[in-house]
């Protein structure tokens, strides 16, 4: 997958996760960053669970799941 696809999936995943977790996005660069890091987190989680998702939609779902988990962990750490 090329860098443009990473940026598109990262932006979409960050935007979706931002709406799920706090009701808004983080701006274009923030969404991309959250989405790309979320994709790494989601990929690791899916790997641990023995799940695999392919294609654009599968990558987007993986990134959104990872981004939501990432934002949840960040929220818990900020509260502590």
Image: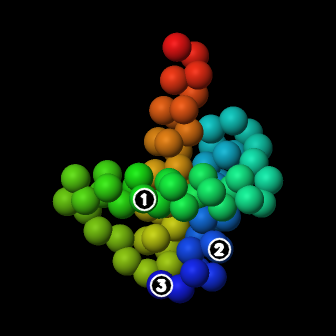
Give the mark nearest the N terminus, 2 or 1.
2
Name the residue located 56 percent from the left edge and 39 percent from the top edge.
Answer: 71
What residue would you read off at disc 3?
A: 1
In screen coordinates, is 77 left or right of 42?
Answer: right
Q: Secondary structure at mark 3?
A: loop
Query: Rounded to the nearest whole Å, what is the CA distance between mark 2 and mark 1?
Result: 15 Å
Visible residue check, residue 13:
no
Label 2 packing within 10 angstroms: few (<14), some (14-19), many (20+): some
Query: Rounded to the nearest whole Å, what is the CA distance between mark 3 and mark 1?
Result: 14 Å
Q: Residue furthest top?
A: 80
What residue would you read off at disc 2?
A: 8
Q: Position of residue 49 (x, y in %)?
A: 22, 53
In screen coordinates, is 53 left or right of 19?
Answer: left
Name the residue located 43 percent from the left edge and 81 percent from the top edge.
Answer: 55
Name the residue located 41 percent from the left edge and 52 percent from the top edge.
Answer: 41
Label 1 packing within 10 angstroms: few (<14), some (14-19), many (20+): some
Image quadrant where residue 13 sits: bottom right
47 versus 18 height, above or below: below
Which sits in the foreground, 79 or 18?
79
What's the image's color scheme?
rainbow
Give the mark nearest the N terminus, 3 or 1.
3
Name the residue located 46 percent from the left edge and 51 percent from the top edge.
Answer: 66
Label ID, residue 40:
1
Give the mark nearest the N terminus, 2 or 3.
3
Q: Secondary structure at mark 2?
A: helix
């Amino acid at each position: 997958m090329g860098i443009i696809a990473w940026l598109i999936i990262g932006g979409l995943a960050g935007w979706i996760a931002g709406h799920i977790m706090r009701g808004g996005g983080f701006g274009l660069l923030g969404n991309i960053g959250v989405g790309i890091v979320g994709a790494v987190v989601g990929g690791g989680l899916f790997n641990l669970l023995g799940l695999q998702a392919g294609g654009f939609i599968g990558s987007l779902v993986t990134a959104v799941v990872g981004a939501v988990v990432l934002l949840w962990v960040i929220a818990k750490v900020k509260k502590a």
